[in-house]
Image (spheres, rainbow, N blue to C red):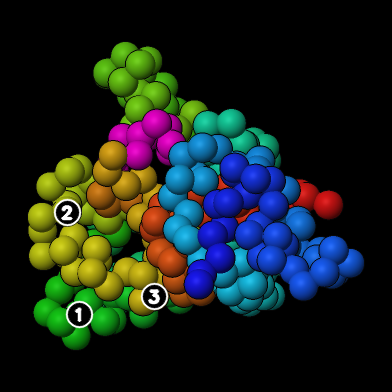
Amino acid sequence: MKKNLLLVVAFALFSFTACAKSSKATVNPEIEKLNRVLISMTDECKAAIPNGNPEEFLADLHKVLDTEKNFSSEDLSPFFLIDKTHKVSSEYEPKNLIHLVKNDYFAINKNNLSLRPEAYEALKDLGAAAKNDGVTLTVSSTYRSYEYQDNLFNYWVRVDGLEEAERESARPGTSQHQLGMALDFAPVDDAFAETPAGKWVYKNAARFGWSLSFPQGYEPVTGYRWESWHFRYIGVEAVKFQEKWFSNVQQFMIEFIDAWKKAE
């Protein structure tokens, strides 16, 4: 019988603790920590987590956390929580950004594009695989500075008004693009999902560690309407973790990892 991760919501303890052979049985301290973290998550996040074995969950979590050593320690974690309420400073810029130029892997439609090295290499792999399948991916937006995002947000406020701008453009300091790990494929509109490139990316991005940031139907969770073209590089293990334990919603997984790291 599987143990239910979310029994914690109703009973404040995992089911396996109630089945201990004796009252003196030692509870894994990481299970206790997981219990505390899950209690702190939003109801939406709790509802997204399926039944499963907590030890299996923790093993998968540590696989993800272990991948951080493959990313530059000079930069923010690939799992850094950035959204409408979690920000980076106006001074933050990733180290060693790689400028995107014309290449054999993917197309670009601007000259001011750059990514962190880890994301760049993963993009090359993604683009090469797409090319092998007869599809060319076009990158339209990558790293954005705080100042760039400030100008962009204000532009959309002038065009669409504040309320609509808040649904589709991040305020400065709150954009995933400032991390240098996110990109927009072209065309940057809902039509992308129905293009050959969009269909290919939706089917294959996870194999290369790319995750859709703002899925359809989750605006109350992410703060943004569906953006079929916006993907964030988090690595293959993290995408597997997201798919297996968080209903394939990036925001839930990133929120959990943030809470896990902050928990005692």
Give the image location of residue 259, x and y in percent: 68, 48
Residue under the point 10% across and 58% down: 195
Relative height, residue 134 to residue 180 (above, below): below
Give the image location of residue 86, x and y in percent: 61, 36
> What is the magenta range?
218-227
Residue under the point 36% across and 55% down: 212
The answer to whether 125 appears left or right of 173 in the picture is: left
Residue density around tag 1, few if under 14, some if 14–19, many if 20 or more, within 10 Å: some
Q: Name the residue furthest front.
A: 22
Residue type at numbered disc 2:
Ala
**Numbered circle sitting on residue 208:** 3
- Let me know if residue 43 appears in the view: yes
Residue under the point 41% across and 64% down: 243
Figure quadrant of residue 208: bottom left
Q: Is-magenta flag for residue 68? A: no
Earlier sequence position, callout 1 versus callout 3: 1
Secondary structure character of the magenta stretch overall: loop
Give the image location of residue 62, x and y in percent: 66, 72
Which residue is labeled 1 in the image?
A: 131
Question: Are dots 1 and 2 in contact, CB under 8 Å?
Answer: no
Earlier sequence position, callout 1 versus callout 2: 1
Residue type at numbered disc 1:
Lys
Where disc 1 sits, the SS reads: helix
3D distance between C-alphas at marks 1 and 3: 14 Å
Residue type at numbered disc 3:
Phe
**Numbered circle sitting on residue 193:** 2
